[in-house]
Amino acid sequence: MKVALLYPPPWKIAAAGQERFAVGEGPPDDYVDGDLDADFFQIPYGLLTLAAEATSRGHKVRVLNLSAMPYAEVVEVVRRLDADVFGMSCWTANRRGVGYVADLIRSFHPSAHVVIGGPHATPFAREMLEHHASIDTVSRGESEATFIELLERLERGAPTEGIPGTAFRKGDQVELGPSRKSMASLDQLTPPQAYFATHIVMTSRGCPWACTFCGAETTWGRGFRAHSTPYVIAALEQALERLPVRMVQIKDDTFTANRKRVLELCREIRARDLRFLWSCDTRVDVLDEELLIEMRRAGCQRLSLGVESGSDRILSNIDKKITAREIRDAALLAKSVGIQVRFYMMLGNRGETEQTFRETLAFLEEAKPHQYVFSCLSIYPGTRDFQDAVAAGWLDPKLYFEGDFQELKVPYDADERTTRLMNEWFHEHRGIQNFYREDLVAARAILDKVGEYHGAHLDLAGAYFRAEDWTAAATHAERALSLGTPVPGLALNYLAVIAQRRGDLETMKQHFLQAAKVDPQHHMLIVNVEKTRAWFRAGGPDLGLPLHLEAGHEFQLLERTLQPTLPGPLAADFDDFDTMPPAVPRHLPTQAEVTLEGHEKQGFGSRSLRVVS
């Protein structure tokens, strides 16, 4: 079967220089550039797992990221894709785009089968079919087995009605097939890294907890399931073979839910000498010092924690099952081993008042994460917030089919004064906020605790650099290199900038040249090299022009705007199902061709909370 897997845009996007599409077709009235979070443009990992599974079974698969593509180009792409099956990933933010693209598919390819899945389609399976005549099937929840069964039935010409885990049409009626059990063993899946260059790896599914705002249980079912350590190691090795920078994001809902598994995985990473840096997301109540030390020595550089609030009352209201004290203690432990701590915070949860909001701000001052980022509460279908809001009568599900908002960002029950206060604060503090950096005392303590680890020496190099002790900073950067840091480009950048601060331009150039040979794919390094070249061209040394270079080693991924990971240009043969995708380029020389994970992030969706009456 010829299979096209698409990630549609959020709405009809106008081309550069053209007017926006009319209300209802284009973006919301209050939309401004930057309202779409940078993460929105990442290809959903689920599309890659579906593609890997279908490809491994002999189907001809194309995966296209259309999330930022002007609508006129989307029309042409769909027209050229002569696929038997079109699959789309449907999220709340792109639900309208899914409908538009489904209509295009039906117009150009009337005999093709259109199937959608994803976290928005799953709880609205029946409604999506009722509102979009061009969609044939909705896959609910975990979809790999469902999708493969659908392909097999279509291939042999068998009816597709009644497949477990689907919603479908039977005549003029919409029906639900029986539920499909979650996979007993995730290891039966083909790793996406076998076919695609992605810095994202998922090692487990599900979360044992059930916060009111989260729909993980709706997607994955109850409980927590994980890949085996050999499976994860193989996926990591395949990922690292394709990536230009040895940095990976582990995007499990709660990576450390099973402590024993993570300890085993970290020790196996070290035993195999898989040198790379990685980040993960988890909860504060599944961390301890031994685990954090093992994680750091295995390359964990950043820990993103779902904190949400600094008010114990709010944490209780959203069923977080943690306290502000536990959060502070966990953050302190992680910082003590040199792991960069990022807090994910929320505004507008149940019971939010001016007092709880100010408690949260005071809590941040006390806990001192390296970074924090706020988002407004979004009411997602499939969450307890959604169910309770509908039951309370202040939310009508039809709004998701009649409204043109990106995501429904509302305070759950805050009054107008509190909502106004949060909006004003959020407007001034959108995006990732850098907050804490280790001083010399803290950096030395990290080295003492972690031992002769390259990352701990790079931490100390950074602390000495900020203290303008160039000799000590250079000593520890060189030690990080000798210990085999997986990001030599950043260590060499320290040495180059130190040389420049000392006035040694020849040594600076030598370090930059060495970095370009061994590890050029870092945003800070690229910016510094471009600044330095421009400075030399302008006669900087002779004219005494200033040259401002930066050094640091924060966990910051530099991503290539290549399909399908990000919505870069399509290959000329994107519609040729008989050819495999082109080999992944190993080098990316110019800043214009890259984007940054988390760089200059403009916030999470709509710029403010609003009241739904």
Image (cartoon, helix red, strand yellow):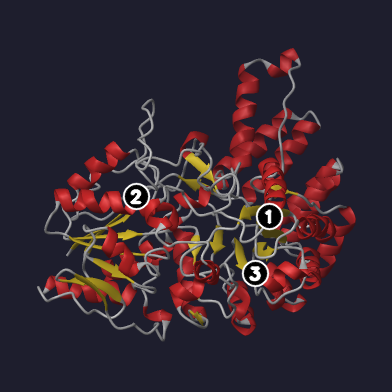
Q: Which mark is residue 97?
A: 2
In what quadrant of the picture does the C terminus appear?
A: bottom right
On screen, residue 64 versus residue 109, left or right, reads right
Q: Secondary structure at mark 3?
A: loop
Residue 298 circle label = 3
* Above or below, 97 relative to 213: above
- Spatial CA span between label 1 and label 2: 33 Å
- Sequence order check, earlier mark of 3 and 1: 3
Q: Residues within 10 Å of mark 2 (few under 14, many from 20)?
A: many
**Which circle, 3 or 2, is nearer the viewer?**
2
Looking at this rendering, what residue extends furthest in the left direction?
157
What residue is drawn where x is 35% and y is 35%?
21
Q: Which mark is residue 441?
A: none
Relative depth, front residue between 410 and 511: 410
In x, y percent, where is residue 7?
Answer: 35, 54
Q: Earlier in the sequence, mark 1 or mark 2?
A: 2
Quarter of the image for the N terminus: give it: bottom left
| Identity of the residue drawn at 22% across and 48% down | 104
> From where the camera sits, is residue 55 visible?
yes
Q: For mark 1, what is the residue?
A: 415
Hey, what amino acid is under mark 1? Asp
**x and y percentages locating residue 65 in the rendered image:** 36, 50
Separation of marks 3 and 2 at Cα, in angstroms: 41 Å
Mark 3: few/some/many CA within 10 Å (<14, 14-19, 20+): many
Dot 1, crowdedness within 10 Å: few (<14), some or many (≥20)?
some
The three-letter amino acid code for the residue at tag 3 is Ala
CA–CA distance in space, label 3 to label 1: 47 Å
Amino acid type shown at disc 2:
Gly
User: In the current view of this chain or complex, which residue is farthest to the right?
Assistant: 441
**Position of 439 relative to 122 (above/below):** above
